[in-house]
Image (cartoon, grey):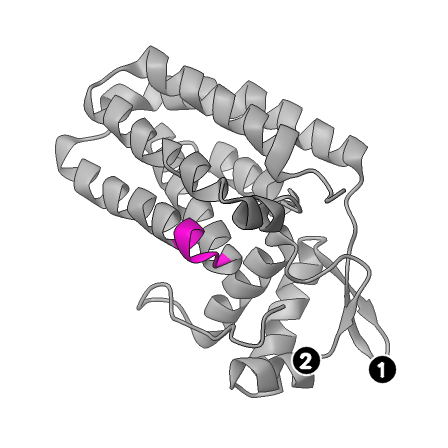
Amino acid sequence: MPDSLTIAPLAKALSLRETVTQILRAAIISGEMAPGEVYSAPALGTRFGVSATPVREAMVDLSREGLVETVPNKGFRVTAVSESDLDDIAALRMLIEPPTVREVTPRIPAEAIPALRELARAIVDNAAAGDLVAYTEADRRFHLTILEYSHNQRLLTLVSDLRSHTRLYGLSGMVSRGTLAASAAEHLELVDLIAARDAEGAGNLMRQHIGRVRAEWAKHPA
């Protein structure tokens, strides 16, 4: 994980514990925190410029999500996710997200479009900057914001959990090849389709997006 990684509050309503939890979750998903590695709360606290307490609390929350496991007297180990697990996660997301995006597109009010576009722009900007942790968290917020218009809390919780267990090991390679920024731009395209009330196009783009995540973003580096 880069030494430059620092805590930047993602929303005023978030507590320090919640902010640290979101950043650590994003670091795990993006591969910045490597599977099998053991991280101590004091060391991460020093890196973030906070005490070990909110880091330890965040790790406890992430252990409940299955993202880390406790290593007695040492810290927390990032859990690995198999290729088979990633296939299963992508298959479930394919079943849920494209039809849901198709369904909610007519429901999203026009006044909500600028905020969605701002979230999409944050994804593009973080991709261009090569900030994988901020990119991953911005991507999560964007997709869950759209799905909130389903008014189905169980669906939202399920997709959030599936996304948390995804691993995007290929992101760093895409940054080095200069391809991540171009791929990130499809989030802006999705906002355009929603604004145009093109439900079919939005659903199809979401299906294409999930397929790309599994095919390239989530693959292990060669």
Crowding at dot 2, Cα within 10 Å, few <14 / some 14-19 / many 20+, comes out as many
Q: Where does residue 123 sit, x and y in percent of width and height?
A: 38, 47
> Which SS class for mark 1?
loop
- Picture layout, residue 103 above or below residue 43: above
Q: Residue at x 19, y 38 (%)?
A: 112
C-alpha separation, residue under disc 2 versus residue under disc 1: 11 Å
Image quarter for residue 170?
Answer: top right
- Picture layout, residue 65 above or below residue 94: below
Q: Relative to the observer, which residue lies in front, 206 or 101?
A: 206
Q: Which mark is residue 41?
A: 2
Residue stretch rendered in magenta on the structure: 126-131
Q: Which mark is residue 73?
A: 1
- Picture layout, residue 128 above or below residue 120: below
Q: Which mark is residue 95?
A: none
Q: Residue at x 78, y 35 (%)?
A: 83
Please state which amino acid type lies under the numbered disc 1. Asn
Q: Residue at x 46, y 52 (%)?
A: 135
Q: Where does residue 133 sit, x and y in percent of width and height?
A: 52, 59
Kindly report the secondary structure that dominates the magenta region of the rendered protein: helix
Q: Residue at x 55, y 44 (%)?
A: 177
- Picture layout, residue 3 above or below residue 167: below
Viewport quadrant of the C terminus: top right
